Amino acid sequence: MFTEQGPTVRELAVQAFSSIERGYDLLAPKFDHTPYRTPDRVLDAVTDEVRRLGPFDTGLDVCCGTGAGVGVLRRLCRERVVGVDFSAGMLAEARAAFPPEGERPAEEEPAGEGPAVDWVRADARSLPFAPAFDLALSFGAFGHFLPAERFGLFAEVHGSLRPGGQFVFPIGAPPPVGSRAYWTLLGFDAAMRVRNALWRPQFVMYYRTFRLGDVLEDLTRAGFAVRLTPLAELGRRPDGSPRARLVVATRE
């Protein structure tokens, strides 16, 4: 996709007509060469903002994929970081990107000792963790959950955090109605609805179902105290509003 290292049209088509899990297993080796991988500028903006909320000892990357969020957590947490995903293929790529200490080439070993990194294969709708984490985050995964599943997902994260722990994630401003981005996302979601009506297994991936007002309501119902903070590094829209905000949900 768009580069020689990315997936071909045929590979994307096979993925699109697979289940979510199988689709990501197939895409995993080339995922980081697609636009679906969270851009570094977003990762850096979130890192800078979340650092002000710390310090943190333990962190959880929910739906970690190939580990971009784990890279953020390694910069923020002192003791332990865990990435959880249900795709074995994505976890394999993540493990390769973040090998345990002692397995990396000497020139890649960090100067200081970083947090331990663990990987867990599990469905985010049924997380296998006790309240053990100070910080949880997620990037780019929420389109894979239907609105009816969102509260349950948030409740699982809530149950994985210690009291006072924080669940953070970026959320972009919706594109202006009638803009090219607006019609692109609308068209993509419409195509996915048609695909899922006609083909099994379903591949749930929607861009327009994660509306801020609904998200804040579900977080509150799950037991979080929620606030928003602008991600200033990502700029502002012509009307002066931020292009993206960081949702900070604290377990009370």
Image: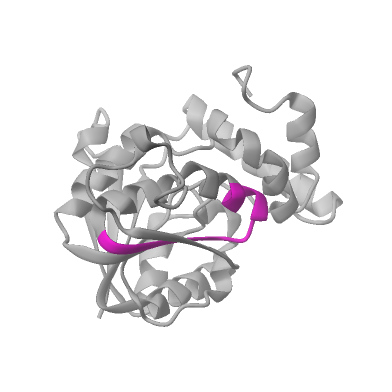
Q: Is residue 67 visible?
A: yes
**Would you say 232 lies left or right of 19 here?**
left
Residue 237 versus residue 73 in the image, above or below: above
**x 43%, y 42%: residue:** 104
Question: Where residue 248 sits in the image (x, y, percent)?
Answer: 27, 61
Residue 208 versus residue 251 in the image, above or below: above
Which quadrant would residue 78 be assigned to in this image?
Answer: bottom left
Question: Where residue 124 sits in the image (x, y, percent)?
Answer: 54, 67
Q: Residue furthest left?
A: 52
Q: Is residue 236 visible?
A: no
Nearer the observer, 8 or 80: 80
Residue 90 lies within the magenta run: yes
Nearer the observer, 137 or 203: 137
**x 39%, y 51%: residue:** 101
Instruction: Give, as a single range, the part of the protein colored magenta.
Output: 78-92
**x 37%, y 37%: residue:** 106
Quadrant for the N terminus in the image = top right
